[in-house]
Image: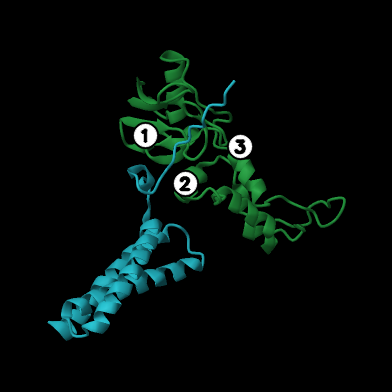
Chain colours: A cyan, B green
């Protein structure tokens, strides 16, 4: 009797199924990586046009997002319970906005 | 409530079948499946054994998330429509039943098997309060239900990736001072 091909359902990242149930920890990880990739391009742009305000602002925003999510990851590595994951993500986001607004008000407004 | 169940058997096309099941207080998804099978369609296939979250047999994807059907109260889902699918990344056998053999195969492939240092194997001398034991405590709670593998998107990307269950088992063996492997 010929062997039937195996039928396996796949949870692929490019499908909606792949993103169902995605939680704070995954989003934090993903946003930090995306910020890192974006930083590579923005840093190159910034070196070429150091006084372009939009690029300066973008650079600051990306550095803050990447750095503060990195601090979140370090803090979690100390073994904080899972319930801190979302709170630390919110705290990193809030701190990003506060620092960005402070720098904007101080230097660029 | 409406139970939308993934149906498939070898040689047939997959489909979603709807079952109307009267929801009762304290009813779990497993209760609803059993009710649908007994009253509406005896050919509906799913797997369960202990009914108390110990065996892991009833792991399935309920409303997009991997859960044990026996430990999932309908009330906790906060919806009248419940979609039930089989676990991802495992070969389908029929309907909600999958073949969990790849779980054991991957565990063996990464070498997550205990090899005793002494012959014959000595009885465990690792106390419950030992730091070594406490480090692996959460990891040895694994009951091999396969839900972590189903939830993992990396498993689909590269067949060489052993998946979280095998890596978890590997960690428990590596952390065991009695292991010579």
The quadrant holding residue A97 is bottom left
Sequence-wise, the earlier of marks 2 and 1 is 1
Q: Is the N terminus of chain A in the top left, top right, bottom left or bottom right quadrant?
A: top right
What residue does disc 1 label? B75
In this rendering, is residue A34 above or below A13?
A: below
Q: Is residue A87 visible?
A: no
- Report whether A94 appears left or right of B134: left
Among the two numbered marks 3 and 1 on one chain, the one whose residue lies closer to the N terminus:
1
Please report the residue visible at 27 percent of the width from the left and 83 percent of the height from the top. A47
Name the residue beneath numbered marker 2: B156
**What subunit carries mark 2?**
B
Residue A17: percent from the left, percent from the top?
36, 42
Q: Position of residue B79 (x, y in %)?
A: 31, 34
Residue A44 x, y percent position in the rendering: 29, 78
Residue nearest the viewer, comparing A30 with A2: A2
> Which circle's residue, 3 or 2, is located before the other in the chain?
3
Q: Nearer the viewer, residue A11 or B139?
A: A11
Assess disc 3: are there few (<14), some (14-19) or many (≥20) residues with their C-alpha within 10 Å of its C-alpha: few
The chain that hosts pointer 1 is B
Q: Label 3, label 2: how many angstroms apart (C-alpha)?
A: 16 Å
Circle 1 SS class: helix
The crowd level at tag 1 (other Cα within 10 Å; few <14, some 14-19, many 20+) is some
Judging by the rendered image, the residue that carries numbered circle 3 is B101
Q: Specify few, some or many for label 2: CA neighbours under 10 Å numbering under 14, 14-19, or 20 or more.
A: many
> On the rendered structure, is B140 left or right of B79?
right
The chain holding disc 3 is: B
- Establish if B28 lies above or below A86: above
Residue sticking out furthest to the left: A109
Badge 3 and badge 2 both on one subunit: yes
Q: What's the distance in space between the residues labelled 2 and 1, CA to CA?
A: 32 Å
């Amino acid at each position: 009797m010929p062997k039937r091909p195996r039928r396996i359902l796949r949870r692929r990242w490019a499908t909606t199924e792949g993103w169902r149930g995605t939680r704070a920890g995954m989003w934090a990880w993903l946003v930090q990586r995306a910020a890192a990739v974006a930083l590579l391009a923005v840093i190159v742009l910034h070196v070429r046009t150091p006084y372009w305000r939009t690029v300066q602002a973008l650079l600051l925003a990306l550095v803050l997002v990447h750095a503060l999510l990195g601090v979140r990851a370090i803090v979690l590595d100390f073994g904080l319970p899972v319930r801190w994951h979302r709170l630390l993500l919110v705290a990193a986001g809030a701190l990003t906005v506060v620092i960005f607004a402070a720098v904007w008000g101080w230097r660029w407004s | 409530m409406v139970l939308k169940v993934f149906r498939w058997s070898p040689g047939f096309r997959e489909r979603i079948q709807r079952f109307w099941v009267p929801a009762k207080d304290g009813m779990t998804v497993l209760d609803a499946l059993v009710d649908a099978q007994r009253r509406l369609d005896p050919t509906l296939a799913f797997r369960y054994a202990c009914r108390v979250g110990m065996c892991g047999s009833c792991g399935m994807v309920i409303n997009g998330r991997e859960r044990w059907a026996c430990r999932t109260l309908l009330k906790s889902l906060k919806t009248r429509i419940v979609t039930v699918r089989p676990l991802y990344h495992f070969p389908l056998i029929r309907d909600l039943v999958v073949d969990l053999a790849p779980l054991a195969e991957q565990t063996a492939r990464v070498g997550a098997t205990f090899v005793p240092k002494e012959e014959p194997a000595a009885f465990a001398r690792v106390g419950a309060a030992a730091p070594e034991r406490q480090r692996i405590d959460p990891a040895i709670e694994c009951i091999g239900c396969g839900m972590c593998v189903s939830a993992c998107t990396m498993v689909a990307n590269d067949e060489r990736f052993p998946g979280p269950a095998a890596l978890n088992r590997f960690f428990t063996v590596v952390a065991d001072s009695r292991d010579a492997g």
